[in-house]
Image (cartoon, grey):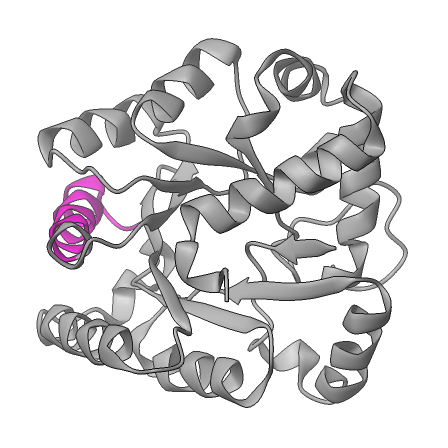
Amino acid sequence: MFIDSHCHLNFDCFGDDREALNSALQNANINKLIIPGTDAKRWPEVAALAAQNVGFYYALGIHPHFLDTFEEAQLSDLQSLLTEALAADNNKCVALGEIGLDKLITTELAEQEAVFLKQLAIAESLKLPVILHVVKTQARVLALLKQAKFSHGGVYHAFSGSVEVANEFIKLGFKLGLGGVITYPKSHKTRLTVSQLPLSCFVLETDAPDMPIYQQSEAYNSPLNLPIIFQSLCELRKESVQHVSAQIYDNTNLIFPLIND
C-alpha cells in the first residue's frame, strides 16, 4: 500500500476526473493521500474534499506563493479552523502546511519569514507537524525552526540536497519528501543522498499536478505516478522492495499519526 503525502488534488485540473481518479488510486493500492492547503480561500474546499473521501486527509496553511492575498486576520482564522478540526471525530486534519520560504518569488523574504514564524507558533501550540516549502532557503529555514523552538517535526516537501543538509532537518524531527526529482537519472546529488541516508527518514509524494516525473507525457502530474517514484527509490536502496514499502508506509504514519486509523 502507498500513501501520497503531498498531493494538491483540489486543484482545478483534477475537477472533471476526480471520481475516476479516486477509483484508479484504490486499484493502484494508493489508499491514502494528504492534500495541503495553500491559501485561505482554498481551505474550505480542501477540508470538504477530505471529508467526502475515505483515505483523504488534509493540512491547512499559507503558502509563500499566495502572500499577495495575505491578511493578518487569516492567521486567527487558521488557528480557529485547525482547533475545530482537531476537535472533530474524523481525524482528517493532520498538519499545518504548506508553509515556508521561497527565494525565487517577488514577495520580500522578511514578509515570508514573519508569516512563516507565526504559522510555526500556531503549529507548536496545537502540537501539529508542518509541511515545509523550501526553495533556496535551507539555512534560513533551519535557523527559523530553531529560533521558534519548533518541536513537532513534519515533512521537508520536495527534498533536494546533500546528506549534510538532510541530517540537519532530520535532527529537528523532519522526514524528507521524495517525489519526481529522484526519477531523473541526472539528479545525481539528490539520488546519491537518498542512497546514503537511513530509510527511516523518507516519505513519498507526488506534489500533483506539479513536480513531473521523468519522461512524463501527461500535461500534469498525477498521484497515480507514486508507484513510479517508489520504484526509483527501490533502485537506489539495498533493502528489499517489501521492506522499503513497509518502512515508507510506517514513516508516513509516524509523522502524521492521525492517518493511522
Q: x, y percentage for residue 2? A: 71, 54
18 or 211: nearer the viewer: 18
Q: x, y percentage for residue 211? A: 66, 49
Residue 121 included in the magenta stretch of the image? yes
For the magenta stretch, what is the residue range? Answer: 105-122
Q: x, y percentage for residue 234? A: 80, 29
Residue at the outermost front position: 261
Q: Is residue 185 above or below residue 210?
A: above
Q: x, y percentage for residue 144? A: 17, 32
* Side of 25 relative to 55 (left or right): right
Determine the residue positioned at 84% across, 74% down.
24
Determine the residue positioned at 44% across, 9% down.
164
* Side of 78 relative to 242 (left or right): left
* Side of 203 relative to 96 (left or right): right
Q: Is residue 136 above or below residue 55?
A: above
Task: Confirm whether residue 185 shows in the render.
Answer: no
Q: In this view, does 175 lie above or below 133?
A: above
Determine the residue positioned at 63% across, 11% down.
196
Looking at the rendered image, the quarter that the N terminus falls into is bottom right
Determine the residue positioned at 20% across, 37% down.
151
* Side of 218 relative to 187 (left or right): right
